Image: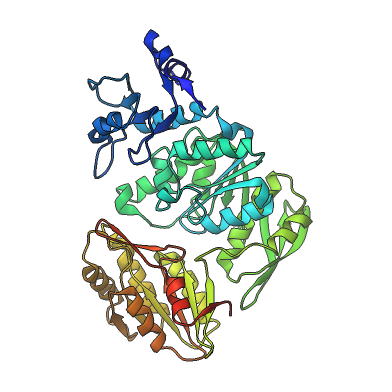
Amino acid sequence: MAKSLAELASIAGFQPQPAWTRIVIEGICEDTRRLRPGDLFVAIPGYDRDGSDFIARAVERGAVAVLSEESVDLPVPVLKAKCARTALAQLSAVFYDHPTRELFAVGVTGTNGKTTTCHWTADLLGRSETLLLSTVRNPILAISCLTTPPSPIIQQLARGAVDDGTHNLILEASSAGIAQDRVSDIDFDACVFTNFSPEHLSHHNGLASYRSAKLKLFESLKPEAWAILNADDPMYSDIIAATPARVLTFGIDAGADLHAEDIQPEARSSRFTVVVAQEESETVFLPLPGRHNIFNALAAVGVGVVKKIPLPLIAKRLAQVEPIPGRTEYFRREDGLVAVVDFAHNASSLETTLRSLRSEYSRVIVLFGCPGDGEHEKRAAMGEVAGRYADAVVLTSDNPKNEDARAIASEIQTAIGSSLVPVTIVLDRRGAIQLALSQAKKGDVVLLAGKGHETEQLVEDERVPFSDAEALRELGFTEGD
């Protein structure tokens, strides 16, 4: 797929120059590591490095045009934009001929439950008919560290999905992805709001900015789209006031359009009745436990309802949802010891997982850490939760980046405070896992929290291979319980 620079610029609202008709654009790129000869390079202002610092390198590597927020003198054409991120999204959609207009496109945002809701929504819509982009399902391995890919990648994958006959797109929309316009110019048919709690505040300059990022997704919806909202979360009323879209609410406690009744929690599953608009109901068996997973299931059901999938078929497909890597994955050793790998990486998700496990096991030993380079509020909150719900805590490293891992662990330990729960610090994560397992006996459970599906540790500027699940396998554990 290629377009002349004149055609691309004209459609995107730039004033083309006559000579641009002879310049062929082969792709759109904002990262010189992925840039190919013939690309248009978009210089994005960054947090640590500015895209303008890489313009010369982009031209050396074959960029035939550049978009920048600043005036620059180059041997290739320069498009100047007020906001490079917005222009990047717009140019990407234009270059790939707006593929999301040809798909049933769903965005899922919220503090917790995004990944699970995305995967279960894909199960309801049909995995073979769905392009799923989530934290643990990302076809572009080079950007696996991003929950929401850059806009050129999303539009490229969406075009490929259309060309392959795919009908649906499910996209996990992180707050950073929304704020940085990675999901702008996506023609969403529905967007889901799971819940809201303090998270990533240092990256968003406070709670208000984080909240605004979530609202931005719903403010941009077209009137015929659907906003599918958790009515048990106080923020849902703010979204209703902000969005021009049609609204479908879901919940357990509130009087939602779509809600769960007759909930029967079990150790490893849940059974409930889903009621739609007080007119239709169906019994649902969910092969995972926990109130939080009922919310995730209701969110997915909401997408199925607006897609007009029959409720009995929705219930059937929910009973057969596929396991999600790093989300409450059970492992067992021959001696009966059980370990769980879970992505619980903030206070609310850690509390949910710990409370669920406490109802099932004699003792809960939790191992976790916190990422470096900010988010100090997360450390205090997770430490407080661990001290309240665990029987023993092992603190270790979790993507310390350029920060001292011991200082991070000490910060968490301070938050645990004078709790009677024993706390041990072992910075080597593999050694920490071995220690946590040595503290457990049959009837206990060891929760390895925070990394879930991740297969790397971010230490300074290095990506060090490491997987909690693989570490357990090396220690004689196998999946299942």
Which sits in the foreground, 247 or 306?
Answer: 306
Residue lying at 35% horizontally and 51% vertically, measured from the top left: 207
Q: Is residue 36 left or right of residue 476?
A: left
Residue lying at 43% horizontally and 88% vertically, measured from the top left: 440
Which sits in the foreground, 412 or 424?
Answer: 424
Q: Is residue 9 visible?
A: yes
Residue lying at 67% horizontally and 62% vertically, measured from the top left: 260
Q: How is the image coloured?
A: rainbow
Residue at far top of view: 18
Relative to residue 111, is residue 154 depicted above or below?
A: above
Relative to residue 109, is residue 163 depicted above or below?
A: above
Q: Is residue 275 left or right of residue 42?
A: right
| Corner quadrant of residue 150 | top left
Which sits in the foreground, 333 or 239?
Answer: 333
Relative to residue 405, is residue 88 depicted above or below?
A: above
Spot occupied by residue 116 in the image (x, y as percentages of width and height): 55, 59
Spot occupied by residue 232 in the image (x, y as percentages of width and height): 55, 57
The tally of labels here is 0
Spot occupied by residue 329 in the image (x, y as percentages of width and height): 53, 71
* Quarter of the image that includes the C terminus: bottom right
Residue lying at 67% horizontally and 46% vertically, measured from the top left: 129
Q: Is residue 242 visible?
A: no
Spot occupied by residue 85 in the image (x, y as percentages of width and height): 37, 33
Relative to residue 345, is residue 40 depicted above or below?
A: above
